[in-house]
Image (cartoon, helix red, strand yellow):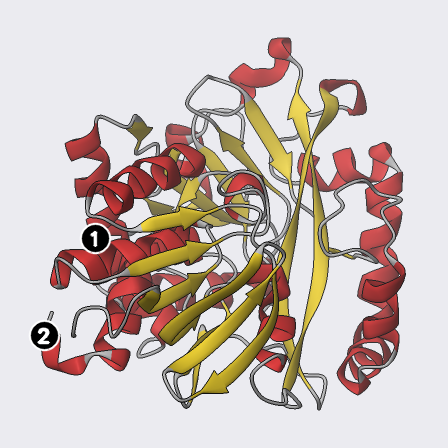
Amino acid sequence: MSGATGEGIYDWVIVGAGIVGLATAREMLQRAPGLRVAVLEKEPDLARHQTGHNSGVIHTGVYYRPGSLKARLCVEGRAILLRFCDAKNISYELTGKLIVAAAEHERARLEELAARGRANGVEGIELLPGDAIREREPHAVGIAAVWVPGAGIVDYVAVARAIAEDVRRSGGDILLEQEVRGIRREAHGLTIETARGPVRATRLVACAGLQCDRVASLSSPVDRLRIIPFRGDYYRLRPEARSLVRSMIYPVPDPRYPFLGVHFTRRIDGDVWAGPNAVLALARERYARTGFVLRDAADLATWPGLWRVVGRHWRTGVAELWRDWVKEVYARDLARYVPEIRPRDLMPGPSGIRAQAVARDGSFVDDFAIVEEGPALHVMNAPSPAATSAFAIAGEIVDRVCPATGA
């Protein structure tokens, strides 16, 4: 990497001040002190969307296909994340996770998860018979389960803020309220048009999350995939019911979908969240059930991949929507794993929106997707476990754009 190429020109501009964008800026500055790096963020604060609206789970890598980016970067990223939290005195808890098969047809998928986790290097995995479940979770039931002791919980906004401190301390700029509106190639590299005027850079990395396809389209056509936003609503267990969950209780995920299903998560403050579901959202960055943005809805309606998803999975979509609006249905699904749960135990909780890339043929993009286009690199699919993986994703990006710097 080289220093600035001219007055007022950054070596690198990073678009997006979520945890992945901030980690990428930090990685660049750690590898090449003195580099001129700026992070552009359209919001007035850091980590306002996917980073700030997730459950805080520290994933282990048990779910992902061996050899995939998700598998490798989740395992690597988790290790770096824990070291970072220790160094910065950021609280986290490794509570463990119980993945429960509620029916016999799920047993084979559960055993496959255990095998995947071991192949990915996840430590301490145990395959439990049904009668051993209550040793881990006294109020849970199932015919079998996988225990993953390394799963945990952390405040990713606190992590993002600590990363931002490192970026600033290393000389990087974090420019808020700088929505990117245009990207233009010029002799020096790129001119990035923002809400507050132009920013010049030699090269660009976009970690734009829910807006990544739109940012990418500013520099070159994007016709292979689009972001389809899926809103997930959580409930919180009332205080009297929190003792029903010790750690985290998850279902066996349906392999047709990139979602993990509604589950229980005990948080650091003792609160317990139940959820999220996955409902098609008509707004990328509005979190209420009735959120609607005309541009977002129009983009959905004109993307052929969405209609292929709807055609294949409409029954599941209707069921998710029904569960979203009827608390009794939500509680019934949760009670498959913790039978004592009742509708009265569920209080309204937060919501998040997953930026899920969908290909033109209607297939869900399952792995992280990183695309290089000339002087720009775009992270095009980085939903969960991207927060856990953020430091490793940053390393992967910097390895690609500046391989000569080494690890």
Q: Between residues 7 and 312, which one lies in front from this camera angle?
A: 7
Q: Which is nearer the eye, 296 or 196?
A: 196
> Residue at (62%, 74%) from the top-left corner?
213
- Residue 192 in the figure: left or right of residue 181: left
Residue 378 drawn at (x, y percent): 47, 76
Mark 2 lies on a secondary structure that is: loop
The image shows residue 352, relative to residue 267, as above or below, that is: below
Residue 227 vertical position relative to residue 78 in the rendered view, above or below? below
Q: To which residue does mark 1 refer?
A: 123
Residue under numbered circle 2: 406
**Residue at 37% over, 36% down:** 161
Is tag 1's residue or tag 2's residue first in the polypeptide sequence? 1
Task: Label 1, secondary structure: give it.
Answer: loop
Residue 111 in sight from this viewpoint: no
Tell me if label 1 and label 2 are in contact, CB under 8 Å: no
Residue 230 seen in this snapshot: yes
Kind of residue at disc 1: Glu
